[in-house]
Amino acid sequence: MGVIAGLDFDGRIAAFAIVMQNAGLAAGPAVAGLLITGDGYGMLGWMGIGPYGPAMVFILPLALSLGKADREGDNTQ
């Protein structure tokens, strides 16, 4: 959310992100219930862990660029 706030000065994307976060919190248990059949906990774990890798590929460069811009723009020390 901090990266989104740093990139979106109008706040529109941040507001949409909160809506999507709540939708995911609502849909998550339903999807988990569909995935758990017998020994389905392994699949559930991968469905939870799997998206973090691609998410980090996208968000880490943005976060680092925002941090670098803040450090370079701060000349008040």
Image: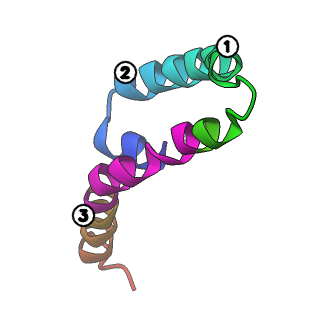
Q: Sort mark 3 into few (<14), some (14-19) or many (20+) by Cα contacts within 10 Å.
A: few
Tell me where residue 56 appears, x and y as whole percent.
37, 55
Query: The residue tagged with tag 1: helix, strand or loop?
Result: helix
Q: Tell whether label 3 touches label 2 (CB within 8 Å).
A: no
Query: Does residue 37 sit above or below 53 in this rendering?
Result: above
Query: The residue tagged with tag 2: helix, strand or loop?
Result: helix
**Highlighted magenta segment, given as a residue range:** 46-61
Question: Residue 57 colored magenta?
Answer: yes
C-alpha separation, residue under disc 3 versus residue under disc 1: 37 Å
Residue 8 position by quadrant: top left
Query: The residue tagged with tag 3: helix, strand or loop?
Result: helix
Question: Residue 48 colored magenta?
Answer: yes
Which of the two discs, 3 and 1, sits closer to the camera? 1
Query: Does residue 32 sit above or below 50 in this rendering?
Result: above
Tell me where residue 63 appears, x and y as whole percent.
34, 59
Quarter of the image that includes the C terminus: bottom left
Tag on residue 65? 3
